[in-house]
């Protein structure tokens, strides 16, 4: 089996970041590496996901633009053809005799933001900065994918007995890909599932044996439609979509807190109107709600929807509300936490094992975790610390590369430990 | 002197609409026609306007894009070179012996909106629809320019004694060009000024001898800057520019009415934020205020500014406010109203003369009117009715072409009448 | 006929101010003086007004409290009995041969506010300050009533031929009494109507021959009802009437201006909630809308109502809206303006005659004016200037007493002039 | 020692409920009963509390009104004289040999609300409904006081060795009395402290060994002052306190949630304006903020204050903010929880022992708990279940009386257990 240096792979992926559902070159590059391994099965694109359950898919033009870019960049056309239309991702499988079926989920997408070209930013200084000019691996999914490949290789080389499936999931940043993998047949027989994230303010050398408190999340988009009018000559004839928008925003943030647990609401994007002198006909907003539980998220969602509708009515506008991507809440299981904590103690370079930590954000790994748990299995979300100079989602985010080895060692050990624990 | 059919000219201009400060092809085409006339002087671009007083100038890229487009469309390169950087417009002069100096101001810019391609829309049906794919003469400035040329020609052919200056003004739609012409030397000796507008809900056959109640107007842009934060993980660390925006909008519309006369406020454009899950760092709005008098407009402007600042402070954001284009209020003088009313009675096709009418909107012809009036001269804003199927600034706006002849006949007669009245 | 010094009468009334529909002592005192005159008819209380059309009537307890106070103060019990339940006011009539029927409307109510006891405030210094401890003639209706009696006496003493009816109208301050007098039979045969007001920023010595631009007005009250909840333990269970209230207020003020003319909106009173730690179950507001025309007022009223309903819905509350008192807009007739202007020139002490002036406020004299005009008659609202140290409706408002004589002289002359003009 | 039936005492107190800092009759009645016991010390009124640290004290008139009422009701004048000015409450002490000093805190105030007179409401049916016509024991403090007296008596009758101090605390409902007792000398030597509450949705027969998650709380009052103006004639001259109020309310509720834990905000009372036609000069609000920790409460408080100030500025008003009563957060100590849980198992009638429960509300017992804990002692807040037909703070709240015995038995046992545990 050909060995791939995971740091080299991470840097290769880092140079070619692609946002959600546009991971064409990324998938092709991963497939090319995976094919060099001794796999028992490799599912690519539409075979890896349940396409109908993709969430937050961008429009066709945007998908096509990135598809063309990947083709021009020289991505393997055979793989590319299988991904057409934005069906990205892969599932790689090794079967090693009789034993439990274990999943490892890693995400592979980048973010639509410009990477720093500052000399202090290592990818810039050392020549592996993003080459796209518009996207960036600013959340470490390049390292996640490299850990996925490395763990697969490590487990394959061990005396592991059982089946390992590594899910290279697209579109995590828009909470769009988790559901499509959770709905695929590949998850059905998974008895144990690991997912991972690097960083999250944990320094290099730390392993978190179970990150928790993922908030359930839902995205909503709303478009208010009123009636344009000349703001000077006939202001009374307008039905002002911007006034509806402003009223909605103010009141969405003012939805009452809930005593049962944390809730969140954010209107993150607004866009409206054409000209200073025209009463705006149309106003658009993108919002999200979260809750500690799926019920609390639903409470927020319902209130936001009522607020949007009443704001429209107040200003005699129509409003169309579109429910977008969403992810449930989930918790790590203690049995797997313990396994991770135990194996991490022996990993070279790991000096601290944290037994639990809350995220406060959301993750669509929860779709896969819940699916496995609902099927009677166990799941655990593992944190692998990394010193990151800039925060997640900022232009100077970077992964401290020893982290990659810590991730591979911890996860391969945690996977290999299960057949024994299982007995 | 070569005669130009004004309807043909109007259709030619209609096919090539260019928005404010980007009237490259338009100016070149007008210059080409004007040069065929027996003028005493022709000032083009920077010679026609006082460049430092241009308001609401778009950014360089945008100007360059339209400049390149005009060049590619085959506009006269000699003229184009003189307009580079967005110094558009022209002033054409005829001197016919001893007599008063009279100005006629017409505007020449189009709007950044798509024209209807419906079969019922005459420009589409008869093949003179906008060819740019992104702009349109949706307010009749194509007809205004044609009337300007036609009037010049008609007066030149008459026994008029005096000087006539026709101001082909750019950038009226953004109230950006009037000031630059009012500050130019060409206005200084103008003793009588006419300006005109077609339509405004007056049907074909009507002439309005003095449109009034132009509201003074000012544009404001504001950018709120806060601090981004992850909306799920650390909402308390954000300083939310979208909340500041919403609070500002609600309170701007709620500025008290003023007993001294009509006031207006509109937030016409908003744009903010990057992603549903990020507390917005930046929010931008474009607003305008108006007042029956310049004082009332200033009252509104001051209140809007205070509201914006307090909204920023409330949400711990900064706000940068930019005062944009503006125009004063102005009134037509009775002496000129009477001349217009009298000559219009004899114009072929004119069946109704309205002695006064209020606009309720704004116009930067008021800069020129006030300048002339401040210098001791007289000014009158003339309405020339036209049956327009769609409203001003809509995709199906069109000019009923007999209007163009009514305009030329009325204005040339009104110009020619002054030397006699003046004696 | 016993003569009453009008300044003495004004001071007597000033000491006993009573608010709307509680003018028991006031009516009794006026009746006592009127009975000493040589009247042809005197209608008191329910005979003077159409009781079903009283607007903005306070609750029974409040009426009874003032009724008892009047009784205790020694008001004539025979008159009082006729006023029971808040049917106040009077109409006094003199008939002098054959001639036109002319009305004069004066209002008689005070305001529920404390009068200044400052030494610089003449009523305090000279001993005729309000004795009620809770109400005040802060708008000059004491002077109006005195002018009404004085004018009646002056006309009675002249060689006037015709019928004069003086309407002593209750409840103007709440725009509650005008309608009840306009609906009474007494107005039906009135061919000419004068109404008057002192002050309004016109100094002593000025007469305004026709105040105009009374805005049509309507009062609205709204009560939001939600669900209380403990703000700490179960905030999500509340339906917050105070949030509905705040949203409604913000959006009421933001109702678009109307191009057809001035509009107004004000939320003047709010009251809500019981305790800091309880989500408010109930919130109450009192608002008013105005418009230059009755249509513009209706536009505002409709928008306010929609805003209130949508605000309730947004916060899952109910809202009950009560339409309160209202008054139409009205204009003075030129014929009467001219008469007033002409006679005022000769009045001793009047040095300035203003031919027209806009009020910008509202007045329910418009009910009577419109009724007379609708019946084919003419109406004129006359201003009588007075130097007033404090503004109307402030604790230091006072009438400069020579004004009273100016009012009597102007109005009696204007009344006496009609039979001649009428011929 | 004379025995007092605690149910009889509870009903006696229930008939005479007095709100915060007005517990004159209540204190006098308690003192009268306490004096019949074999106490070692009894501190009354100003001796029991540190008067300078009273919070949320009502105004003098209100205090005097209830003082007079108590005197008229026949309360012991000797006791009353000591309470004058609103220094209520008492501390009763028994010393029984050498042993630890233990405190028990009970609160004694009622609420300013009308009690139900429905036949289904037992106090009404059985003749011990509130006799004041304006206040009610709607939160069980009558039972608390009775349990305090009963526990004192029970412990006195036992072979307890140590010192017991029962704190009869005033003004809990306004979180106004806790601080004044925590600052008194009586708390200084307390090594163990119990506090208790009946009900809170726990049924009769349940004991909660440690209620937790008291939110820290702070009250704020704000008064906006603008400039009045006539809403019709000169709206632009007003500085509208009601607009400032509405803007403030909307934005207070929209203060971002905090990831560190629960926060709360409520504007519970608003009052503003005088008349529909006057732009409001003054607007008043009463608000509260809470947080899981004192820091989170301070975060909310700071944001509310900034919001209030910016809202004032936006509408050119002044705002005066008054920080009112507040209470810190606190937690029960495990050692005492265990003692309570253990003894409760043996209490007759107690069938369920809950080991921990969150309140979600606030309580100023936390002042005393923190004081004891800061001094190195232990504290525990005990819940005693009661079936209550109506919710706390509603007109039909009632205590199921067997609860009183459960409370006495549990607390006296928990107190008696300490000297043994302490050894």
Image (cartoon, coloured by chain):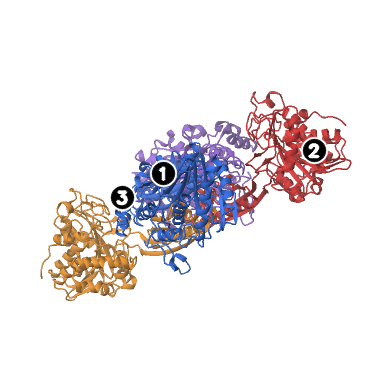
Chain colours: A red, B purple, C orange, D blue
Secondary structure beneath label 2: helix
| Left or right placement of residue D255 versus residue D234 in this view | right
Q: Pinpoint the chain carrying mark 3.
A: D
Closer to the eye: label 1 or 2: 1
Query: What's the chain of the residue with tag 2?
Result: A
Question: Earlier along the polypeptide chain: callout 1 or callout 3?
Answer: 3
Q: Position of residue C105 (x, y in %)?
A: 24, 66
Residue of label 3: D60
B393 or B237, nearer to the observer: B237
Measure the alpha-carbon separation of dots 2 and 3.
73 Å
Q: Which mark is residue D181?
A: 1
Q: Could you confirm whether marks 2 and 3 are on the same chain?
A: no
Q: CA distance from mark 1 to mark 3?
A: 21 Å
- Discs 2, 3 touching: Cβ within 8 Å: no
Question: How far across and how far down the image is residue A140, in percent?
Answer: 70, 34
> Looking at the rendering, in which quadrant would you find the N terminus of chain C?
bottom left
Q: Secondary structure at mark 1?
A: helix
Which of the labelled discs sits on residue A415, or is there none?
2
Q: Mark 1 belongs to which subunit? A: D
Q: Is residue C29 above or below residue B79?
A: below
């Amino acid at each position: 089996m050909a060995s791939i240096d995971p740091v080299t792979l991470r840097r290769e992926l880092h140079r070619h970041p692609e946002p959600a559902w546009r991971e064409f070159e990324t998938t092709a590059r991963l497939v090319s590496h995976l094919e060099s391994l001794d796999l028992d099965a490799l599912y690519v694109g539409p075979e890896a996901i349940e396409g109908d359950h993709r969430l937050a898919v961008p429009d066709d033009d945007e998908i096509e633009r990135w598809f063309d870019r990947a083709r021009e960049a020289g991505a393997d056309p055979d793989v590319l053809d299988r991904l057409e239309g934005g069906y990205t991702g892969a599932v790689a499988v090794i079967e090693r005799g009789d034993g439990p079926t274990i999943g490892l989920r890693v995400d592979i997408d980048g973010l639509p933001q410009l990477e720093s070209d500052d000399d202090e930013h290592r990818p810039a200084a050392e020549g592996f900065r993003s080459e796209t000019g518009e996207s960036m691996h600013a959340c470490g999914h390049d390292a996640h994918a490299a850990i996925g490949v490395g763990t697969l290789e490590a487990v394959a080389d061990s005396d592991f007995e059982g089946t390992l499936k590594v899910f290279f999931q697209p579109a995590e940043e828009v909470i769009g890909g988790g559901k499509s993998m959770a709905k695929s047949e590949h998850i059905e027989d998974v008895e144990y599932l690991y997912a991972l994230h690097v960083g999250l303010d944990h320094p290099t050398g730390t392993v978190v044996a179970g990150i928790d408190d993922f908030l359930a999340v839902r995205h909503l988009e709303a478009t208010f439609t009123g009636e344009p009018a000349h703001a000077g000559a006939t202001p009374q004839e307008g039905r002002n979509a911007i006034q509806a928008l402003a009223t909605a925003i103010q009141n969405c943030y003012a939805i009452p807190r809930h005593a049962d647990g944390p809730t969140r609401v954010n209107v993150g994007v607004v866009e409206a109107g054409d000209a200073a002198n025209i009463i705006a006909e149309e106003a658009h907003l993108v919002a999200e709600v979260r809750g500690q539980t799926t019920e609390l998220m639903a409470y927020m969602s319902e209130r936001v929807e009522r607020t949007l509708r009443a704001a429209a009515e107040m200003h005699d506008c129509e409003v169309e509300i579109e429910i977008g991507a969403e992810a449930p809440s989930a918790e790590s299981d203690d049995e797997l936490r313990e396994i991770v904590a135990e194996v991490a103690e022996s990993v070279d370079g790991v000096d601290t094992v944290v037994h639990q930590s809350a995220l406060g954000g959301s993750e669509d790994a929860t779709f896969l975790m819940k699916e496995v748990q609902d099927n009677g299995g166990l799941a655990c979300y593992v944190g692998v610390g990394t010193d990151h100079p800039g925060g997640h989602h900022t232009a100077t985010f970077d992964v401290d590369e020893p982290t990659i080895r810590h991730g591979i060692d911890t996860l391969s050990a945690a996977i290999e430990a299960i057949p024994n624990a299982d007995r």
